[in-house]
């Protein structure tokens, strides 16, 4: 293949709408600690290597039982064995990684990067039909995966993690329905899927198309002794390593402390990870932090009376960490805590701390300090330009559920979308101006070579870019109108609408304006004309 041909093919592939960060190699995802989860890992690994076995494997489990960590390990091992073709780690915290229409294009892009034979088959299909990425899931599956895989005659493994994180309103999982209809056409391809046992996903796997073709493994059905042994080993390894790093405490942790921690974890690996994160404080010694944690209740009477009893220990841990960080705040600080927590949990694409500060109208220093105080609950990179997000989806579940997060200072309700919508309108109202990027008259955007630099220099990045792309997503989530929201929307459409279109055009996202206006009109009819 000549260089010119490779460049031309790369340009074609770049239109495949690949979701950023969806592959297993992205970011700081951690696999299983060596010596833990060996039974389930060995079972899945044997399945990946035997193409005479069922083509689909569904690993399901409750939040916090370690599904994504196992998926990461399986992807790493499959890659090392030369049989991993592609992976998609879904995440509701990222718009493209929670969009079902991004899954098959992303998998196709990765397969094309991995196998030249697949690439040679995919390129002509994309050239003949570049709009395939906007078509139905069934058409995407057939044209982006089935046809190229048939032509390339590949044997490969595809990993899809956290399928429940994708937005899917169908009573039967839309992606599983498509997979079931197509799986027999690609017999040498195996799909490893993880998810929570949600109703629409269970319906998909139990349906006639997939029921006889799927191996099922339920994590929360593993014997308690096996899970507790793994968690005990995880705690012992992590705390011993922490003691070596920090020093000062001989014989720490004690056997009793390890046993108590395992009891509190109640089978949830996410509890163990969150606890270790909490103990890794740069100022306070881990032994002091552990003593403080042990003094907090392992559960609450309220939690014990609800159907969420399985989350009791995890909820108490999250509550203890939040209260330890913010219990003595004044009223003004409490308002900022609530606003920033709401932004971290509800924004449609994660933002860096400085962008959250700009969007919410706080100082960067204050927001960064606040986030640092609860960094055990967050993925907070050392690089301040990188986005912050909850360290695990179970924290978002907890803080948004009033039956679990009982402290109103921390509970984030759907009404918080109103504040985010108003912040977006306020920032756009203050910042958007005519031709704010000083683009030449009558020139196409593609003809302006330094347009990325212009965007950065005029401030169209971070918070303002987010506001321009996402204001309507928060608006339609409010569910009801307020005078402030209606007034802000009216001002935006009357005074800033054309400037907003200019920015979207430069960002290459002007098509989203149609979606924004359609959904806004629908929202107005529902909340203002009912």
Image (cartoon, grey):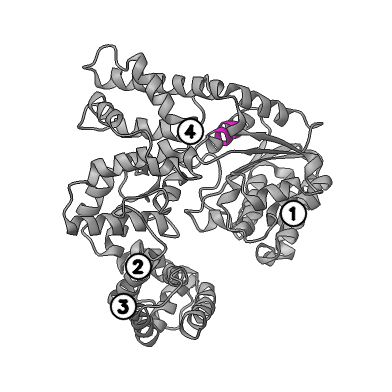
User: How far apart, in angstroms, are the residues tagged by discs 4 and 1?
Assistant: 31 Å
Magenta segment, prevailing SS (helix, strand or loop): helix
Q: Position of residue 51 (x, y in %)?
A: 78, 32
Q: Is residue 299 magenta?
A: no
- The residue to which callout 4 is attached is 268
Instruction: Point out the tag, 1 or 2, that comes first from the N-terminus.
Output: 1
Where residue 198 is drawn, which disc sits there? Answer: none
Q: Position of residue 448 (x, y in %)?
A: 44, 71
The residue nearer to you, when weighing 496 against 423, is 423
Q: Quadrant of residue 458?
A: bottom left
Give the number of the mark in front: 4 or 1.
Answer: 4
The crowding category of the residue bearing disc 2, from other C-alpha atoms within 10 Å (few below 14, some 14 to 19, many at least 20), is many
Residue 74 colored magenta? yes
Q: CA distance from mark 1 to mark 3?
A: 44 Å
As helix, strand or loop, the secondary structure at mark 3 comes to helix
- Which label sits on residue 464? 2
User: At 76% across and 37% down in the image, what residue appears?
Assistant: 155
Q: Pick whichever of labels 4 and 3 is earlier in the sequence.
A: 4
Q: Nearer the viewer, mark 4 or mark 2?
A: 4
Residue 321 in percent (x, y) is at 30, 40
Residue pointed to by mark 3: 429
Q: Residue at x 34, y 84 (%)?
A: 491
- The magenta span reads 70-75
| Mark 3 to mark 2 CA distance (whole Å) | 10 Å
Question: Which residue lies under the disc numbered 1?
Answer: 177
Mark 4–mark 3 distance (CA, rounded to whole Å): 46 Å
Vertical placement of residue 509 versus 319, above or below:
below
Residue 384 against residue 189 in the figure, above or below: below
Q: Real-space Cα distance between discs 4 and 2?
A: 39 Å
């Amino acid at each position: 293949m000549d260089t010119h041909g490779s460049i031309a093919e790369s340009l074609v592939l770049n239109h495949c709408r690949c979701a950023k960060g969806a592959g297993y190699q992205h970011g700081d995802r951690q696999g299983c600690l060596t010596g833990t989860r060996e039974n389930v890992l060995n079972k899945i690994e044997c399945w990946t290597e035997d193409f005479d076995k069922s083509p689909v494997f569904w690993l399901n489990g409750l939040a916090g039982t370690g599904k994504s960590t196992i998926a990461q390990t399986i992807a790493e091992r499959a890659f090392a064995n030369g049989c991993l073709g592609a992976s998609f780690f879904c995440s509701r915290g990222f718009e493209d990684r929670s969009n079902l229409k991004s899954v098959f294009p992303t998998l196709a892009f990765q397969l094309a990067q991995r196998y030249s034979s697949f690439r040679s088959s995919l390129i002509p299909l994309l050239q003949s039909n570049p709009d395939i990425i906007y078509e139905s899931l069934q058409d995407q599956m057939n044209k982006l995966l089935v046809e190229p895989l048939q032509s390339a005659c590949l044997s490969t493994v595809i990993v899809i993690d956290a399928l429940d994180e994708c937005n899917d309103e169908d009573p039967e999982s839309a992606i599983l329905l498509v997979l079931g209809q197509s799986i027999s056409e690609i017999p040498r391809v195996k799909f490893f899927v993880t998810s929570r046992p949600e109703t629409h996903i269970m319906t998909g796997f139990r349906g006639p198309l997939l029921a006889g073709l799927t191996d099922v493994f339920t994590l929360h059905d593993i014997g308690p002794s096996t899970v507790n042994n793994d968690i005990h080993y995880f705690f012992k390894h992590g705390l011993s390593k922490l003691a070596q790093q920090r020093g000062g405490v001989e014989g720490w942790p004690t056997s009793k402390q390890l046993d108590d921690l395992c009891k509190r974890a109640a089978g949830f690996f996410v509890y163990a990870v969150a606890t270790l994160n909490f103990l890794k404080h740069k100022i306070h010694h881990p032994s002091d932090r552990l003593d403080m944690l042990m003094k907090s209740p392992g559960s609450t009477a309220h939690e014990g009376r609800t159907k969420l009893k399985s989350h009791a220990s995890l909820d108490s841990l999250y509550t203890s960490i939040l209260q330890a960080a913010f219990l003595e705040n004044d009223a003004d600080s409490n308002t900022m805590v609530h606003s920033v927590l709401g932004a971290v949990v509800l924004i449609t694409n994660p933002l860096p701390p400085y962008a959250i500060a700009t969007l919410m109208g706080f100082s960067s220093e204050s927001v960064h300090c606040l986030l640092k105080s609860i960094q055990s609950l967050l993925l907070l990179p050392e690089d301040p330009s990188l986005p912050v997000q909850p360290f695990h989806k179970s924290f978002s579940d907890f803080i948004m559920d009033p039956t679990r997060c009982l402290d109103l200072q921390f509970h984030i309700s759907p009404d918080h979308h109103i504040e985010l919508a108003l912040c977006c309108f306020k920032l756009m109202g203050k910042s958007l101006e005519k031709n704010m990027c000083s683009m030449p008259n009558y020139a196409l955007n593609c003809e302006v070579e330094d347009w990325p630099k212009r965007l950065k220099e005029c401030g169209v990045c971070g918070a303002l870019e987010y506001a321009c792309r996402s204001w309507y997503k928060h608006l339609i989530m409010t569910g009801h109108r307020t005078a402030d929201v209606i007034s802000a929307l009216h001002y935006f459409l009357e005074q800033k609408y054309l400037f907003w279109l200019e920015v979207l055009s430069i960002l290459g996202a002007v098509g989203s304006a149609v979606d924004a206006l359609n959904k806004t009109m629908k929202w107005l009819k529902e909340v203002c004309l009912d």
